[in-house]
């Protein structure tokens, strides 16, 4: 049976959340007839049940009853994740339906409200919902004839409807990281606060809040327009140990300024175990090259057990550490191309070594065309099965053949994308690998 139950206030919202889950390989079904639903699909064919109550414009008591009964009817002992899908512009019976869900779960749960949908331009900053940078009450939502929204303040909207105590965690709390958020959630829970509302401005924030929520260990309902619930599902429905064994290795060989900005953004936004390669040592001599390769590969043995993102990059991406090839072309009487080939081949050897000692690495990101070619050759891949486009000039697929057959792969040109491109590529892979 399904391990996830989401109650949505309308059909289109239910389907939108189902599509989010389908994109990360969860089989989701929208319930239209709860009495006959279970008889229509095999028990093992459904990961998540989504039930629309068509209650957005209903009277509060009608909305409460619809949500309450839906949970009682569709909840099973296998259900691990409970979600309350709300409108991305906060229309409808937000507090009332959240109360109904908490009551149906016998009051032992806390509602964690993350009303943001960053990919759709919905973010929460300072407790206010902005839609494409415009305060909610100044958008078309304010003019909705059935569900007009008169304020952008998320806390105010919930407090008008809920009987439960509410609290809020803002961007300062988010910036202090997972451990701080976990402690804050636990503190509010001990104080009897049943609804906690979070600021959130990016997909990385969504991910962080989900990690903190799960780390807190408290039973909770995810209340959001879809992304937060999707993050909780992919982090909790698969076995914990299997999840922790899935890692991603990023290999950055490009030295252009665009790639540096992207690398900096990625390292700042994620918990990453990174090791720089002293690029000059790769070309100084055979002995120096061998020592440097062994040093970098060995360094990854010291990565923290729970770390799931690895990164190796060339020191030449830092302008002051960029290698002057002319010194070595004269010394070895060779071309720039020959020096470049030594560097890219060395990166391929490093990548192979890291993968061999870390069998949990199931995803690979490469930046720079020459590095990508060298790495795929080094891994003895016979091809790449292309699956999709992450962004222009960045492709997602999996390797065919070689000792890493089937490993997921994102390849991106060194100058492709904006400052968030690397971060977005890794996030894309994380979602598809259920990290």
Image (spheres, rainbow, N blue to C red):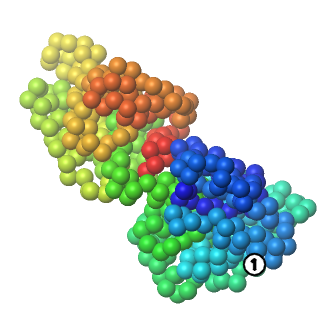
User: Is residue 281 visible in this depiction of the protein?
Assistant: yes
Q: Residues within 10 Å of mark 1 (few under 14, many from 20)?
A: some
Please identify the quarter of the rendering in which residue 388 is found: top right
Expressed as whole percent of the image width and height from the top left, the position of residue 248 reads 36, 43
Quadrant in which the N terminus appears: bottom right
Expressed as whole percent of the image width and height from the top left, the position of residue 421 reads 50, 40
Residue at the front extreme of this rendering = 39
Q: Is residue 241 left or right of residue 10?
A: left
Write the residue at 19% across / 29% down: 282
Residue 281 in the image: above or below residue 62: above
The residue to which callout 1 is attached is 161
Toward the viewer: 66 or 201?
66
SS class, disc 1: loop
Residue 299 in the image: above or below residue 104: above
Expressed as whole percent of the image width and height from the top left, the position of residue 263 reads 41, 43
Write the residue at 24% across / 32% down: 352
């Amino acid at each position: 049976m399904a391990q996830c139950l989401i109650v949505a206030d309308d059909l289109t919202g239910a389907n939108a959340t189902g599509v989010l889950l389908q994109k990360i390989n969860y089989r989701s079904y929208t319930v239209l007839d709860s009495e006959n639903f279970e008889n229509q699909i095999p028990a093992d064919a459904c990961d998540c049940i989504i039930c629309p109550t068509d209650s957005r414009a209903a009277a509060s008591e009608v909305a409460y009853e619809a949500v309450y009964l839906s949970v009682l009817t569709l909840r099973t002992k296998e259900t691990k994740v409970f979600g309350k899908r709300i409108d991305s512009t906060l229309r409808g019976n937000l507090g009332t339906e959240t109360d109904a869900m908490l009551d149906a779960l016998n009051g032992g749960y806390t509602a964690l409200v993350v009303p943001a949908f960053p990919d759709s331009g919905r973010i929460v900053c300072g407790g206010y919902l902005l839609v494409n940078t415009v305060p909610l009450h100044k958008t078309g939502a304010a003019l909705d004839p059935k569900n007009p929204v008169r304020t952008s303040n998320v806390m105010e909207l919930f407090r008008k409807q809920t009987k439960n105590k509410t609290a809020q965690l803002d961007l300062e709390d988010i910036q202090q990281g997972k451990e701080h958020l976990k402690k804050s959630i636990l503190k509010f829970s001990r104080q009897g606060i049943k609804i906690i509302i979070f600021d959130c401005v990016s997909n990385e924030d969504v991910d962080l809040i989900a990690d903190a929520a799960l780390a807190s260990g408290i039973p909770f309902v995810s209340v959001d327009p879809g992304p937060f619930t999707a993050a909780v599902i992919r982090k909790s429905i698969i076995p914990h140990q299997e999840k922790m064994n899935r890692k991603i290795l990023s290999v950055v060989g490009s030295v252009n300024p665009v790639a540096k900005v992207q690398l900096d953004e990625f390292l700042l936004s994620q918990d990453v175990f990174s090791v720089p390669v002293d690029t000059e040592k790769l070309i100084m001599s055979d002995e120096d090259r061998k020592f440097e390769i062994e040093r970098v590969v060995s360094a990854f043995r010291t990565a923290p057990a729970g770390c799931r993102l690895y990164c190796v990059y060339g020191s030449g991406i830092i302008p002051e550490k960029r290698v002057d090839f002319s010194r070595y072309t004269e010394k070895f009487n060779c071309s720039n191309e020959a020096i470049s080939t030594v560097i890219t081949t060395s990166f391929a050897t490093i990548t192979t070594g890291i993968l061999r000692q870390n069998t949990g690495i199931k995803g690979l990101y490469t930046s720079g065309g020459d590095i990508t070619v060298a790495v795929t050759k080094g891994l003895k891949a016979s091809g790449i099965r292309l699956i999709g486009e992450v962004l222009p000039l960045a492709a997602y697929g999996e390797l065919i053949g070689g000792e890493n057959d089937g490993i997921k792969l994102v390849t991106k040109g060194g100058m492709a994308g904006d400052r968030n491109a690397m971060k977005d590529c890794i996030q894309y892979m994380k979602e598809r690998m259920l990290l």
